[in-house]
Amino acid sequence: MASKKVLWGSLICGVIIGLGISYIAAVAVDKTGQPEFCMNCHEMKPMGETFKFSVHGGNNPQGFAAHHCTDCHLPHNSLIGYLVAKGISGTRDFLAHVGIMKMVDFKENFNEMDNYVYDSACLHCHEGIKEPETAVGLSENIKQIHEKYYWEPKKAGEDISCVKCHNDRTMTHFAHPNLLETLSK
């Protein structure tokens, strides 16, 4: 009888401890993806400063904003993939910040956006654009443009990404307006 109580007590304690650890981990993942956290490092300040003036930073008629840097800058294919990429990215950023690794030259890599923004992240919010049949809220013109430059190349097996067209070079207030100018200061 006593062993059953010990077993149940251990099980209940294990569940409570597991839930507590899961909650702490979820809060940590959330907090470390927010702009305030990312901008703690001086090398990320220009990205945070320019982001708030962008369409994705809330400078749009609806006032909607992506709330985490990781909304765009981590893959959203799966929870495991997201967490692994977050761990690798965070470790790399930290090691660069403390001088163990070479820091990313954001000016030099400005045109390499497809290495820093993931289609799965875009489509996580813009889910209705994945397939022509499910595209909602698009004008006929925008639908035709996506058909020609996104859906058809995707169907043909081309390696196409959202940021090929949607980026700070082609759309001045897309994600980080005036980032190059800000980095040059």
Image (cartoon, rainbow, N blue to C red):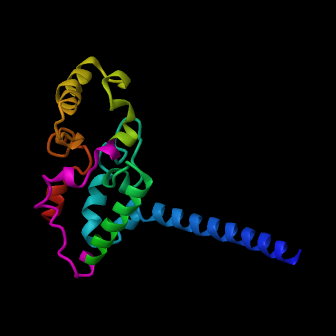
Give the residue drawn at x 21%, y 41%: 161
Q: Which stretch appears magenta?
A: 96-122
Verify whether residue 115 appears in magenta.
yes
State the image coordinates of residue 10 (x, y, percent, origin top left).
Answer: 74, 74
- x and y percentages locating residue 144 in the rendered image: 22, 21
What secondary structure is the stretch in magenta mostly built from?
loop
Of all residues, the one furthest to the right in this rendering is 1
Please report the residue visible at 41 percent of the width from the left and 61 percent of the height from the top. 83
Q: Nearer the viewer, residue 56 or 6?
A: 6
Tell me: residue 141, above or below residue 33: above
The quadrant in which residue 101 appears is bottom left
Residue 141, image x, y percentages: 23, 20
Asked if the magenta segment contains residue 62, the reply would be no
Q: Is residue 134 above or below residue 115?
A: above
Quadrant in which the N terminus is drawn? bottom right
Q: Is residue 184 above or below residue 157?
A: below
How many numbered discs sit on the rendered protein? 0
Closer to us: 132 or 110 = 132
Q: Quadrant of residue 119?
A: top left
